[in-house]
Image (cartoon, rainbow, N blue to C red):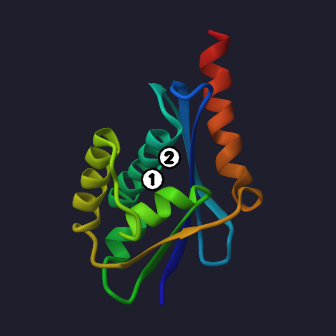
Amino acid sequence: MPKIYINTDGGARGNPGPAGIGVVFYDENEVEIHSYKEFIGNTTNNQAEYRAILKALLILEKSKWLKNNNNPDSEVVCRLDSQLVVEQINGNYKVKNEGISILLDSLNKIKCKFHIKLIFTYVPREQNKRADRLVNEALDEKCKK
């Protein structure tokens, strides 16, 4: 079964405050195959987390990997260090914030385009260091200007 992993992170300095996202794609052997970072303006930590996973799915949607593997036998494991966001995406927690609700709706629309097994799982921060580093790089680069 073809499989990839996507680690994402979003963070804001202040809540809300200047925010960034980081996305890292790994192949089935846990070798990094793509990374992305972006300053996303002022937002909350939770909104940044959602924006990171949304960006990851948009990158996946345009990827060669998906073109070759968009079938139920393929698996994409999305790993986030925000348990709240994972539980909301998986439908275990209700979303009360309107801004988050809009982001979750966007995420669900993108998910419908895929024919793959898409898994959202929580990982401890220590297992998400690369994505976290990309968030901080995006923020540092923007804040230096």
Residue 79 point in image, percent of width and height:
57, 65
State the residue in front, 44 or 21: 44
**In terms of image quadrants, where is residue 22?**
top right
Residue sitting at x 29%, y 65%? 111
The residue where tag 1 is placed is 53
The alpha-carbon separation of the residues under discs 2 and 1 comes to 7 Å
**In terms of image quadrants, where is residue 14?**
top right
Q: In the rendered view, does 74 fall on the left or right side of 25?
A: left
Q: Is there CB contact under 8 Å for labels 2 and 1?
A: yes
Residue sitting at x 31%, y 56%? 107
Position of 56 relative to 43 (above/below):
below
Query: Which image quarter holds the C terminus?
Result: top right
Given this view, does label 2 or label 1 mark the residue nearer the observer? Answer: 2
Disc 1: CA contacts within 10 A as few (<14), some (14-19) or many (>=20): many
Q: Amino acid at mark 2?
A: Glu
State the residue in front, 19 or 86: 86
Q: In the rendered view, does 114 fall on the left or right side of 43?
A: left
Q: Amino acid at mark 1?
A: Ile
Residue 66 point in image, percent of width and height:
37, 69
* Helix, strand or loop at mark 2: helix
Residue 91 point in image, percent of width and height:
35, 69
Q: Which mark is residue 49?
A: 2
Residue sitting at x 55%, y 29%? 15
Q: In the rendered view, does 97 fall on the left or right side of 51?
A: left
Q: In the rendered view, does 116 fall on the left or right side of 8?
A: left
Position of 63 relative to 51 (above/below):
below
